Image (tube, coloured by chain):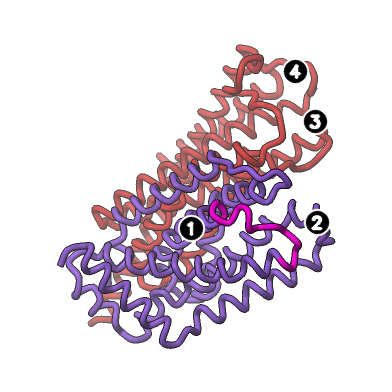
């Protein structure tokens, strides 16, 4: 099987597994919602303050949620003893990562899109006029988070204290994503919105570097 | 044993000479005064720490491709020693900053990325304590080490572009920055001394890790019998 066909097959499996239970998505959505509400108590969410702090807290909520959501990614395979079967079923182990990271990007993007209107309403930030650009940042940011997160969840699944370990390994690694996505989002939510292309380019560079690293080293992550 | 004592003595002398150079040979800085002398410890430790992490990165790559435990031992030794030097940077930085800038800390590119670097390698060591099986521990930490090292320039770039609100670096900054030639000499000598110290510490740590690895192997064999 080629990389493309095995990735599509595995992606179908990931999406089916999730949409049967939907537990990952519901939990993540509620988690982000909770963080957004709790954050409002830490500063005075007036119109101007929200514009300054809103993007940062939104991305922090996304990152925290992702570090929890990516947990079962490989753990599920391990608990069900399906990892070896998965490895035997594809010729290129990169397909496993590719399928998982595309699925994770979609899940993250889905929760983010769901949370955006709620965030906009609660914090009085107009998002409709920059919706397209916002989705672009969400996509590039979530892709970066998913690439690094999928790789690291393969590591943390085999360690002790894995629930704590994944956020610990993932969050410092994602500093550049947090900085760049927040910066671009701040620009988009500005009173006169603008798209900071430098930030968008930076996110693309991050995604490409880590995708290449995963492509080069991914197979070693799945060794037994 | 004799060789190690000799090496330690030489390193001791080098570090002493570097301290002497920093206190008595280097000229006093015009605006900052004597406190600037911490610069020789601060910058040389920072460069040495980066060198140690680079050694760790190379060892990680070699481990992934060759699977010889030696590279794993080298990587943990380098990571720990690098962490020590980075800690020196993070402690000496605020001591220098407070009298000069009036604040202990500022979220500038170099400070923040050093801090993130420190955190990343802290997690690297933490990961090692949380994976039981030796081969798997070595492989996973090597892979994480590779990801972490690749992340460092990105962290620095992102913070430098968007989060910095403070002057150009003194060393290798833009025009107008620069050091007195004597200062350069003392700085490079301090760096050399620190590198020697790094090599000494790394060698000692490596010997310890090698002994531990062998012990683990022997114990494993004994259990199998």
The answer to whether marks 3 and 1 sit on the same chain is no
Quadrant of res B40 = top right
In percent of the image, x 80 and y 56: which residue is there?
A: A47
In percent of the image, x 25 and y 53: which residue is there?
A: B65
Q: Which mark is residue B28?
A: 4
Q: Kindly indicate which chain is depicted in purple in the rendered structure.
A: A
In the image, taking residue A32 as reference, residue B56 lies left or right, namely left
Element under disc 1: helix
Element under disc 3: helix
Residue A12 in view: yes
Q: What is the distance, in whole Å, between disc 4 and disc 2 at their CAs? A: 51 Å
Q: What is the distance, in whole Å, between disc 4 and disc 1 at their CAs? A: 53 Å
Q: Residue furthest front?
A: A129
N-terminal label among 2 and 1: 2
Q: A185 or B21, which lies in front?
A: A185
Q: What is the distance, in whole Å, between disc 3 and disc 1 at their CAs? A: 43 Å
Quadrant of res B128 = bottom left
- What residue range appears in magenta? A121-134
Seen in the picture, residue A192 relative to A42 is either above or below; the reply is above
Q: Mark 1 = which residue?
A: A139
Q: What is the distance, in whole Å, between disc 2 and disc 1 at their CAs? A: 26 Å
In percent of the image, x 36 and y 76: which residue is there?
A: A14
Q: Kindly indicate which chain is depicted in red in the rendered structure.
A: B
């Amino acid at each position: 099987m080629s990389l493309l066909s095995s990735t599509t097959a595995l992606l179908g499996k990931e999406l089916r597994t999730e949409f049967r239970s939907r537990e990952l998505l519901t939990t993540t959505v509620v988690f982000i919602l909770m963080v957004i509400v709790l954050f409002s108590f830490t500063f005075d969410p007036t119109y101007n303050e929200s514009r300054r702090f809103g993007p940062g807290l939104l991305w922090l909520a996304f990152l925290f949620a992702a570090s929890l959501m990516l947990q079962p990614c490989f753990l599920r395979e391990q608990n069900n003893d399906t990892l070896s079967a998965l490895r035997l079923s594809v010729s290129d182990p990169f397909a496993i990562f590719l399928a998982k990271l595309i699925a994770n990007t979609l899940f993250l993007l889905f929760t983010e899109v769901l949370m955006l209107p709620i965030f906009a309403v609660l914090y009085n930030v107009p998002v409709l006029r920059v919706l397209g650009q916002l989705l672009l940042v969400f996509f590039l940011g979530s892709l970066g988070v998913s690439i690094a997160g999928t790789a690291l969840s393969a590591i943390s699944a085999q360690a002790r204290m894995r629930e704590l370990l994944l956020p610990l390994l993932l969050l410092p690694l994602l500093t550049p994503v947090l900085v760049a996505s927040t910066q671009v989002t701040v620009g988009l939510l500005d009173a006169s919105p603008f798209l900071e292309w430098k930030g968008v380019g930076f996110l693309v560079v991050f995604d490409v570097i880590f995708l290449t690293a995963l492509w080069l080293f991914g197979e070693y992550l799945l060794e037994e | 044993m004799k060789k190690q004592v000799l090496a330690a003595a030489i390193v001791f002398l080098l570090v002493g000479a570097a301290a002497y150079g920093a206190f008595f040979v280097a000229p006093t800085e015009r605006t900052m005064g004597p406190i600037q002398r911490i610069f020789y410890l601060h910058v040389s430790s920072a460069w040495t720490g980066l060198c140690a992490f680079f050694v760790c990165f190379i060892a990680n790559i070699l481990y992934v491709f060759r699977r010889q435990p030696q590279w794993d031992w080298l990587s943990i030794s380098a990571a720990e020693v690098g962490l020590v030097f980075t800690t020196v940077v993070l402690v000496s930085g605020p001591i220098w900053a407070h009298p000069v800038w009036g604040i202990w800390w500022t979220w500038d590119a170099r400070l923040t990325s050093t801090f993130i670097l420190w955190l990343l390698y802290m997690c690297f060591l933490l990961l090692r304590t949380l994976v039981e099986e030796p081969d798997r521990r070595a492989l996973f930490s090597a892979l994480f080490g590779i990801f972490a090292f690749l992340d460092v320039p990105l962290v620095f770039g992102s913070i430098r572009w968007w989060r910095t609100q403070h002057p150009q670096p003194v060393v290798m900054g833009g025009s107008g920055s620069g050091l007195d030639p004597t200062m350069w000499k003392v700085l490079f000598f301090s760096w050399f001394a620190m590198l020697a110290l790094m090599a000494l510490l790394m060698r000692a740590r490596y010997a310890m890790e090698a002994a531990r690895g062998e012990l683990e192997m022997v114990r494993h064999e004994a259990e199998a019998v």
